[in-house]
Image: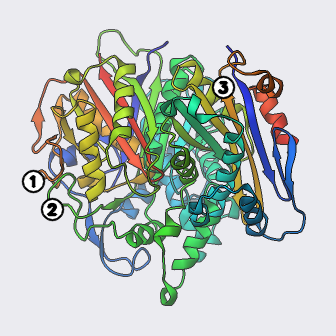
Amino acid sequence: MEQVISAYAQIKPGQVRVNGRIEYSDENFITFAEFIKPFFKSLNLGYPKFYKMDPLSKLGFIASELVFKQLNLDSYDRKRVGIVIANSSSSLDTDIIHQQSISNRSEYFPSPSVFVYTLPNIMIGEICIRHQLRGENAFLISERFDGRLLTKYVNELFQQNRIDVCLTGWVDLLKEDFEALLMFVEPGIWEMNAEAREIALPFSEKTVNELYTIM
Amino acid sequence: MRSVYIAGHNIITSLGITTAENMAAMEAGAIGIRMTSNPRLFPTPIPLSLVDSGVLEEKFEAVLAFHKKTDECSSFTRLEKFLIISVHEAIAPLEQDFRDNRTLFVVSTTKGNIDLLETRSASLFPPKRIYLWEMARIVGSFFGFANPPMIISNACISGIMALMAAFRYMKSGLYDQAVVTGGDILSEFVISGFQSFQSISPNPCRPYDAGRDGLSLGEGAGTMVLTTKKTNDTEKHITIAGAATSNDANHISGPSRTGEELALAMQKSMTEAGLSPSEMGFINAHGTATPFNDEMESKAIALAGLVEVPVNSFKGYWGHTLGAAGLIESVASIQSLKNQRLIRSAGFETLGVPEPIRVIASNEDKEISSCMKSASGFGGCNAAIMFELK
């Protein structure tokens, strides 16, 4: 049995794509915040918690929303939805903010709302809270995008029957550099409708690496 | 599906730099958490479990000499020294070669070389050393491992998750051996963060006790060497029998209100192991000694049908060692299993959690054949892993 990608989203500076098609573009931005805020507003999600998140979680959260928008999550057992995400810089973007808040004894103001984001898996927690997902999680680190790492980990989860479906991919952000590729992986095309079958791609190391390269 | 056996291990904490030193100290009731006045770590005195730097440096010199390395001690960070010593101690007594491509190398950490973000330390190392993959690469290349490290950074369940990943890959035949290591150091970064949450106790922590008022932070490293080959057929072996994770989907910095999700991870790991609650020797739970964590765990233990099973937390000995905790505490748990001896949950006197769990109040010999290690962390993550003696 070979798993398939039934939906995916890609975000890079200036551009957002869903299932390969351009969903949003804006070349007139300087910071990540300037890019992501208007796009978030355009989605009309009505989820004010978004504004409390750190930039890495915001990036992962939006990419996950774009993926989940393509599906009906109610048709899955939420205790059997896995989330496996990797990146290169862990939570370094927010680590730097926390370090700045303690670097000077006369201006010493560490904040719990910053410190909690100094772990990369908080992004997974945010996605789980949003959709009440309670299944297997993992946050992995690799120097560069590594399709083999992700497909190996996720395929084991399927083969050992630990999950029914999985959100997986890469969400990396450091200052104004950012990239996200999140994919929804299902066990096969048999249960899908005709439209979904058309989009479906094999969940293989080769395809995953290609999706990352063409971002 | 193949069996996964434990072939080697090490623990580095304030109580010692070998598994044996740590177990002997616990047996004697030693507590490694001490009031520490170090303005580099925190402006006012605070209880911490720190590894003695003199002991660390001396041991590291010996490890460099053993491996005939010409590097200077100063070309490795404090965490890299922890991990290199820990891996060395775990593999040195074994005959196997770990440098082939059938050996998986897994590293778990929450913050890696986070001390390099401090301006006074930053200039001593190349900037990329702050990245977890570079830190892990340095450790792996020290031993000449063929495969690049697999790196797990998933808050306080990282250590269990690292063991779980290796277990799953070996179970399905992708690797024959694994060296699984994890570590975290104490830094101004981490201490200031937990202090901002007001979660640090002014005294050594007291898991599950009615008077508990917060956690104690610790540093250290732990390593487990796994193999799919039995070393001999006559002796009993300890195996990893099951493991699972779950998410609370409730709050990013507070535990579940019900404990249902940790219970789910516990039940899944028991099902995989094919073990029932009545067969469980003890549970080494997370037991951070924050009011909410311990409360949630008691509910999860009850929900999973484990309320009669003896429970301990090792954090009263060496504090919460974050990304190392799952490994350090798993190693201590399997020693407990091997020695047929339950270890007292340090700091505990009077039960202070809602469910009537059986916290181990004194060291005691007991015939046991399996145990569970569990953990929960920020981001709502939970994990449980089962060890069996057979």
Residue type at the position of mark 1: Glu
Q: Do labels 1 and 3 share a chain?
A: no
**Front residue of A215 and A145:** A215
Residue type at the position of mark 3: Glu
Alpha-carbon span between mark 1 and mark 3 = 50 Å
Classify 10 Å Cα crowding around label 3: few (below 14), some (14-19), many (20 and above).
Answer: many
Q: Where is residue B176 in the image (x, y as percent from the top left)?
A: 54, 20
Q: In this view, does B365 lie above or below B361?
A: above
Q: Do the residues labelled 2 and 1 touch (CB within 8 Å)?
A: yes
Q: Do labels 3 and 2 share a chain?
A: no
Q: Work out whether residue A113 can be spotted.
A: yes
For the point 53% across and 20% down, the residue is A161
| Circle 2 SS class | loop
Residue corresponding to mark 2? B211
Residue corresponding to mark 3? A186
Residue A202 figure quarter: top right
- Depth check, mark 2 against mark 1: the one in front is 2
| Circle 3 SS class | strand
Alpha-carbon span between mark 3 and mark 2 = 48 Å
User: Nearer the N terminus, badge 2 or badge 1?
Assistant: 2
Classify 10 Å Cα crowding around label 2: few (below 14), some (14-19), many (20 and above).
Answer: some
Classify 10 Å Cα crowding around label 1: few (below 14), some (14-19), many (20 and above).
Answer: some
Residue type at the position of mark 2: Gly
| Circle 1 SS class | loop
**Front residue of A86 and B147:** A86
Q: Which mark is residue B349?
A: 1
Give the letter of the chain under mark 1: B
Q: Are marks 2 and 1 on the same chain?
A: yes
The quadrant of the picture occupied by the C terminus of chain A is top right
